[in-house]
Image (spheres, rainbow, N blue to C red):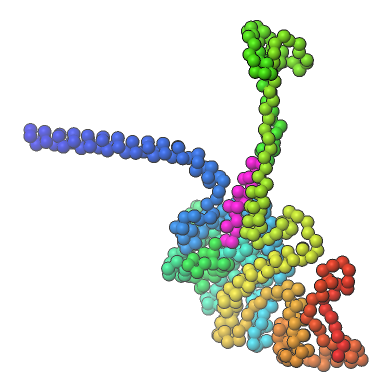
Amino acid sequence: MNIIFEGLKDLLNINIFNSKKRKELDTNENETEIEKRDYGKIYRKEVEFYDNLSFSNSQKRQDSMTRNMDIVLDKIKDETFKLPLLARSILNITSKSSDKFFYFTGNDDKKVIRVAKEFNKILKSSNYNPNLFLKEAFQNLVKYSNVFIMPVKDEKNKLIRLKIMPNKGWTVNKKIGTFLCEEFVFQDYYEDGYGNTKQKVFKNKIDIFHYTFNRESDEIFAMPIWCSVIPVIKKYNFLTNNALQSYADQAITRIIYEVGITKSGTIKPTRQDQFDSTKRLLKETDDDLIIDLPVNVNKVDKNFNSPDKLLEVLETQIYAGLYTSKGQLGSTSSGRQDAETQDENTLNITNSFFKEMEFQINRTIIDEICMNLFGSLDDEIEMKFSEGFNLEERREKHAVFLFQGGIITIDEARKMCNKQTKKFEIKNTFQNLYSKTNSEMSGTVENVNNPKNQYTSGTGTTKKTKKN
């Protein structure tokens, strides 16, 4: 009996302890729910007004930039459709890639031609042409600052195809510190007919080529350059919408009839039947009324308030964060000279992306082709993007100026102009073919700018020729 009694006592103590513990847990949960309810509205307003792309939490940014950046890519993709200024800025830069040409250089011209043919062959077998492949890779680099290209190789480990992979779905599987990734895992690499997905491990720089732009030295993925400006644009849109709502509220007016109150505020006693009849007449008819009661009329409406100064400050931050100007976004009209200056600024930004992609392609795809064809990288064969007509024209004029000044040779001048030197036949040049006009065509080109081209009057030339 004692044993049974002790057992019941222990069981009763346990039940009492559990009931007390359950009450304490319920109390804590209730307090938590109350706290969530109290701060819920404030939190929702804060999230609605601001944006967490600024990554005020350093741990959140580290996880996104060193492990998986899908959340960042989703936000960039969503905000591109919501924010026309962001979409316009990205389009201004990516549109410059449509007319971008590329060429190959190296120490051996024959090997350069072989590499160029092999590169075009690989792209053709990948259902790309050179312009389409480079344009798609360039768009990913501009919009997301990251590009993933998968090389497909045959049984002899020879590169035969290339595939630009989606940016979303990559997780770091094996890394050194927070700056070097050895293996990536692609989440949805394969899906069977039953909806099941399988992962695949890719060795970095072997099974997958990862290109980045403006990557921090302590991160694996590159933070898209548009992340810093998105919160500013959201604030701008928030204030603009509020100003529009305030403008629409001007049409809302309220008229208050104070029956039995004079204009001076004196209250005059009024019978209930007089009040009811006056109220009915004021409510049901718009005709003039003749009554023996004082009626004071007050009109209440809303005033329009526009945060112009704050919007101007945000506009300046937006244009700086979008690497553009008002004229390029269509906010203001600009003259020819301003338009050319703005276009030059966009070209400079575009060239920064192209230089980065040029380096990445040379160190991966072109090096892979050279190793397959020649077994070495001694010939320094590289792919280069053209710099645009204006920059090429300046470089060619400068090369001619140095050559005519006796500073460089004809081969060095042609090399500066990205022309071949070994197959150059000087006897087929214009001056030798038309020797009769040689004296008229000879001269020195001054590398000077004429200020008259900035105004409507004057010759408008930027080059002067002097006879020897």
User: In what quadrant of the picture does the N terminus appear?
Assistant: top left
Question: Is residue 446 among what the camera can see?
Answer: yes
Provide the residue span drawn in magenta: 224-243
Residue 74 location, x and y as percent?
56, 54
Q: Please say if 448 is above or below 136.
A: below
How many numbered marks, from 0 up?
A: 0
Residue at 76% x, 77% y is 393
Q: Is 432 left or right of 301, judged from the image as shown?
A: right
Q: Please say if 338 is above or below 422.
A: above
Q: Please say if 136 is above or below 364.
A: above
Question: Is residue 91 among what the camera can see?
Answer: no
Q: Please say if 127 is above or below 433.
A: above
Q: Is 156 left or right of 123, judged from the image as shown?
A: left
Residue 427 location, x and y as percent?
82, 93
Residue 350: name its quadrant: bottom right
- The secondary structure making up most of the magenta span is helix
Residue at 71% x, 13% y is 281
Q: Is 288 left or right of 222, judged from the image as shown?
A: right
Residue 384: name its quadrant: bottom right
Please say whether residue 31 is one of the residues in the magenta stretch: no
Decide which of 123, 451 is in the foreground and name it: 451
Residue 161 location, x and y as percent?
59, 71
Residue 209 location, x and y as percent?
54, 70
Decide which of 374, 330 is in the foreground and name it: 330
